[in-house]
Amino acid sequence: MRRSFVALDLQSALATAQDAAVEAGELLLDGFRSLTADAVRSKGVERDLVTDLDVSSERLLVEKIRGVFPGHAIEGEEEVLDPLELKGYRWILDPLDGTINFVHGLPAFAVSVALYEDDEPLVGVIHAPLLGETFTAISGQGARGPAGALRVSQTDRLGEALLATGFPYGRNELEHDNLANFGRFFYDVRGMRRMGSAAVDLAYLAAGRFDGFWELHLGPHDVAAGALLVREAGGLVTDGSGGDEWLRGGSIVAAGPKLHPELLARIEH
C-alpha cells in the first residue's frame, strides 16, 4: 500500500525523470562520437563493460534528482546505492543500458530512470538518445511513446510472435544461461531478436513492436522503468515462476495478457 502516494506530484516526478534522462542522453551522444579505448574497462567478467560515460551519466542523473528530491533514496548501477533497508521513495537508475552496443557503435542503448515507493513502481522513463525516442509511464495513468499512447500486442499465438531476450555476461559459470530457453521458442515463433538492452526491449514491448520478452540474471536497474511501461500499456510482468519477484528476483517474463502464459510455460530459470 502506498503510504505517501498523495504526498508526491507524480507529474513533477515524471518531468524531473524525463529532463534528467534526456540530458544524460545528450552527454552519452557526445561521448558516443568520440569514445576512445582507454575509456572502456570490464567489471569483473571480461565481456561486462563499463565506460567513463556510464559513470558520468549516473552522476548527472543523481545530481538532477537529488536537486529536486533530496530526501529520496537512489539506487544506481555504477556508484550510488543508498541502503536497501531505506523504505519509501527510491529512484532506480541505469545510466547506460546497452553498454556493449554503445562501445561497438550500435544504436540500441538507453537511459532508464524509475521512481518506486517501496516495491511499487510509480514513474518510469526510457530514453534512447541515438534512436531519438523517449518512452514514459505513470502508475495508473498509462504509458506514452513517440507516437502517443502505448499498447502491448494482443497476439495470442507463438507462430505470430516476435520475441526478444538476452544472455547474461557470466553465462560460462551459470546453470541457466538462457540458451536452452531460446531453443524452446526458436522453431515455433515468427522471429527472435536480441537487442542488447533490456530497457529498449521492454519499451518496444510496451509499444507493441515486440510481442514478448524474457531474460534471466538481470538487476533492478535493467527492468525498473521498462516493467512499468509494459504494465501501463496493458501487459503482464512476472518473474520466471509467474510471481511478483521480477524486480530483484533475477528473472522477468513480460508480454501481452494472451501470450504471457505461452512464454511462462516454456521458460526455465
Image (spheres, grey):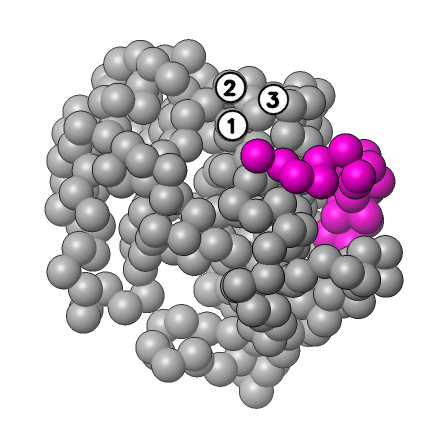
Whichever of callouts 3 and 1 sits on the residue coming sooner in the sequence is 3
Residue under label 3: 150
Q: What is the C-alpha distance between the residues marked 3 and 2?
A: 9 Å
Marker disc for residue 234 = 2
The residue under label 3 is which amino acid type?
Leu
Image: 138 above or below 39: above
The residue under label 2 is which amino acid type?
Gly
Q: In this rendering, would 142 be left or right of 170? A: right
In percent of the image, x 53 and y 63: which residue is there? 85
Q: Are marks 1 and 2 in contact (CB under 8 Å)?
A: yes
- Element at badge 3? loop
Q: What is the C-alpha distance between the residues marked 3 and 1?
A: 10 Å
Q: Does any portion of residue 164 appear in the rendered image?
A: no
In percent of the image, x 61 and y 22: which residue is there? 150
Camera-near label (3 vs 2) is 2
In magenta, the rendered stretch is 1-21
In percent of the image, x 43 and y 79: which residue is there? 43
The residue under label 1 is which amino acid type?
Arg
Place of residue 147 in the rendered image (x, y in percent of width and height, measured from the top left) = 69, 23
Marker disc for residue 231 = 1
Image: 127 above or below 68: above
Q: In this rendering, would 177 be left or right of 37? A: left
In percent of the image, x 52 and y 45: which residue is there? 119
Magenta stretch, overall SS: helix
Residue 13 falls within the magenta-colored stretch: yes
